[in-house]
Amino acid sequence: MKTVMVLMLVGVLVALASAGVFMLRKPGSEDERGQRMARALALRVALSVALFLFILLSWSMGWVQPTGLPVGR
């Protein structure tokens, strides 16, 4: 389960990086660049929401357990 979560987080970062590349690259037209960047950012948001819901599902099913922060003395 943790592997799936890490892969989804990597997917979020890749979508964010591709949106940055689309923003900086000079393709044929301004509209095409804007559409590709918006699509990459929409994918990032969708992956982030899916990751959040998957973490909640995993916690409720008992697949992962929160450990909290270690308390120092």
Image (cartoon, rainbow, N blue to C red):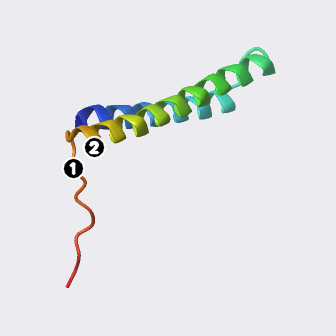
The kind of residue tagged 2 is Trp
Q: Secondary structure at mark 1?
A: loop
Q: Residue 51: which quarter of the image? A: top left
Residue drawn at the location 61% of the way across and 35% of the way down? 20
Q: Is residue 10 left or right of residue 42?
A: left
Q: Which residue is mark 2?
A: 59
Quadrant in which the C terminus appears:
bottom left
Q: List x then y, in percent, for residue 37.
A: 65, 26
Residue drawn at the location 44% of the way across and 31% of the way down? 50
Residue with the most extreme bottom position:
73
Q: Residue 56: which quarter of the image? A: top left
Q: Is residue 51 left or right of residue 27?
A: left
Residue drawn at the location 67% of the way across and 26% of the way down? 38
Q: List x then y, in percent, for residue 15.
A: 51, 30
Q: Residues within 10 Å of mark 1 (few under 14, many from 20)?
A: few
Instruction: Work out whether 65 lies above or below 29.
Output: below
Q: Secondary structure at mark 2?
A: helix
Instruction: Work out whether 2 lies above or below 34.
Output: below
Q: Is residue 67 left or right of residue 7?
A: left
Residue drawn at the location 27% of the way across and 66% of the way down? 69
Q: Closest to the observer: 20 or 25?
A: 20
Q: List x then y, in percent, for residue 8.
A: 37, 32
Q: Residues within 10 Å of mark 2 (few under 14, many from 20)?
A: few
Q: Which residue is mark 1?
A: 65
Check contact, mark 1 vs mark 2: CB within 8 A. yes
Q: Of marks 1 and 2, which one's residue comes earlier in the chain?
A: 2
The kind of residue tagged 1 is Gln
